[in-house]
Image: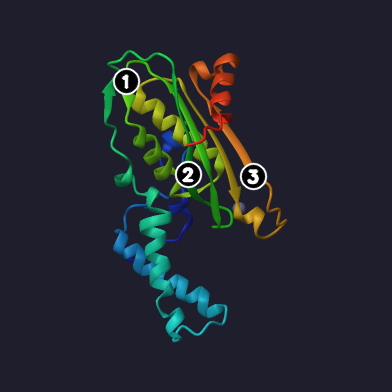
Amino acid sequence: MKIDNNIEGYDPLGEDHVGTSSNTPLRLDAFKLSNEEKIDIIKDDVRHIMETLGLDLTDDSLNGTPNRVAKMFVKEIFGGLDPNKKPSASTFDNKYKYGEMLVEKNITLYSTCEHHLLPIVGKAHIAYISNGTVVGLSKMNRIVDYFAKRPQVQERLTIQIVKELQEVLNTQDVACVIDAKHLCVNSRGIRDIESSTVTSEFGGKFKDKAVRREFLDYIKLETKF
Ligand SMILES: [Zn+2]
């Protein structure tokens, strides 16, 4: 099956999502093709790019690249476009009545810039204040990873992580800070290897200056392990 590239197919994902920039812009037919069908089409596209660049695809070293890249796009680095891969929403009761903020910091993040399809590499720091519900710590890593595995802009990624946790935890009191390097800035174009980009989203109680300060102070802690 070939994707229909006419302009109707490029509408955003349904009326509900219009105007909410926090959603990944998806085509209406985003999930009509199976992953295997997508890999098949992308494989040919990658081959076409490489051949257009003048590369000899009969060379042993290049031979497997189109298939390898297609699989990597669909199953790995853009695997988070697939809603079936969203981490399950298992939560627990806050039995110990811990009422302070919980911070998980230095979550390794690998994403892809949607403007250049080059890597974004960084750290995410997340905090929430429980409203009676808690999540397993690794759930936060999984949520970061799921939304990171899409073509992204860092601002949207930050918001998507917070919104998802707000829904899972049933509270607005969630915050996320991401500090990341964009290889489109570091390795090409302006080639500024030192710069990194910081984005933040503060929900509920984290809009309060003192609460926000506490979170930011925890992030700064450099514990030796
Ligand atoms: Zn870029």
Q: What residue type is labelled 1?
A: Thr
Task: Return the residue at label 2.
Answer: 108
Check contact, mark 1 vs mark 2: CB within 8 A: no
For residue 32, side relative to residue 61 (left or right) = left
Label 2 crowd (10 A; few <14 / some 14-19 / many >=20): some
- Identify which amino acid the numbered label 2 is placed on: Thr
Query: What residue is disc 1 on?
Result: 133
**Vertical relation: 217 (above or below) 55:** above
Dot 3 amino acid type: Ser
Q: Position of residue 54 (x, y in %)?
A: 56, 82
Say whether marks 2 and 3 touch (CB < 8 Å).
no
Total label count? Answer: 3
**Considering the image in quadrants, where does the N terminus appear?**
bottom left
Residue 74 drawn at (x, y percent): 38, 59
Q: Which of marks 2 and 3 is nearer the N terminus?
A: 2
Report whether residue 3 is seen. Answer: no
The quadrant holding residue 67 is bottom left
Residue 116 vertical placement versus 146 (above, below): below
Q: Name the residue under label 3.
A: 196
Q: Tag 1: Cα neighbours inside 10 Å, few (<14), some, or many (≥20)?
A: some
Q: Which of 200 and 100 is in front in this view?
A: 100
Label 3: which secondary element: loop
In front: 3, or 127?
127
The residue that appears at 52% across and 32% down in the rendered structure is: 223
Q: Residues within 10 Å of mark 3 (few under 14, many from 20)?
A: some
Mark in the foreground, 1 or 2: 2
Of pointers 3 and 1, the one earlier in the residue sequence = 1
Please name the residue shown 33% across and 42% down the image.
Answer: 86
Which one is in front, 197 or 46? 197
**Which residue: 52% across, 41% down?**
123
Spatial CA span between label 3 and label 1: 34 Å
Q: Is mark 2 on a helix, strand or loop?
A: strand
